[in-house]
Image (tube, rainbow, N blue to C red):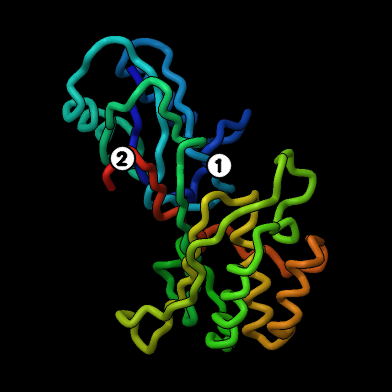
Amino acid sequence: MRYFIKLAYNGTRYHGWQYQPNAASVQETMNKAFSMLFNTNISLMGAGRTDTGVHAKEMYAHFDFGNPFDIPSLVHKLNSYLPKDIVIYNIIPVHDEAHTRFDATKRTYEYHINMFKDVFLQEQSWFLHQKLDIDLMNEAAQLLFNHTDFQCFSKVNTDVNTFDCKIFEAKWTQDENEQENNRLIFTISANRFLRNMVRAIVGTLINVGLHKITVVDFNAIIESKNRDKAGFSVPAHGLYLTKIEYDYITQ
């Protein structure tokens, strides 16, 4: 029987989701917890990678297990055993061919920027004290809908077969609950993302907001398919994976 796990984690202490030798990862930490509680080797498959320091408000992984078990009891035991920066929300029975990575139809990320120094958000938001032209950044972000090839925002030497992605949403908003609108959030949704794509898009849009490049330049960068022409990659600790959607799972 195959099961999906709905979880979240604070990525500050981890070198991303995926297992890495000699480095702490979320996948390895969870593999150990599941294997200990099931008293057999359990290997989880995640919905995708996250970079070192990136957070996930919603992540999915799957595993196979032949014998029935009490799901609420296991969720409780896992949350008691796992470190405080990883939480299991639910374990969901699915069909045997279901796959958390390949079956995802939509993924959403947020990038959080703090415009005023906040000592409680040092690892959860990027502090940027420079003034940004948010309207211009949103104008540039709308150009993402006109393209599907985002090679210019991809990490170089990646092993993907295609750089095509379909963007569903891309916008900047200011958090109205924050005093003097000090929190700025970029939300982007797509059917898939390339490695480092969101952080490179945000860095390039920041250059638009700082008036270092124009909206026309932003479009030309996408058409160039050249990572060297795009902007810098913003720090990982401001990035959150916030939602993954599947046709057969009710959110």
Q: Residue furthest front?
A: 146
Say which of 7 and 117 sits in front.
7
Residue 217 has which mark?
A: none
Mark 1 = which residue? Answer: 49
Residue picked out by circle 2: 249
Tag 2 secondary structure: loop
Q: Residue at x 48, y 58 (%)?
A: 109
**Where residue 184 sits in the image (x, y, percent)?**
46, 77
Residue visible at 35% across and 17% down?
36
The percent coordinates of residue 150 (x first, y second) are 69, 58
* Residue 122, visible in the rendered structure: no
216 w.r.t. 19: above or below: below
* Left or right: 56 as drawn, with respect to 84: right
Image mark count: 2
Mark nearer the N terminus (1 vs 2):
1
Which residue does the image show at 41% across and 55% down from the upper left? 242
Q: Report the amino acid beneath label 2.
A: Ile
The one nearer the camera, 66 or 145, is: 145
SS assignment at label 1: loop
Q: Up-down: is 226 above or below 178? A: above
Q: Amino acid at mark 1?
A: Arg
Which mark is in front, 1 or 2? 2
Please tell me how crowded label 2 is: few (under 14), some (14-19), or many (20+) other residues with Cα within 10 Å. few
Whole-angstrom CA distance, mark 1 to mark 2, is: 21 Å
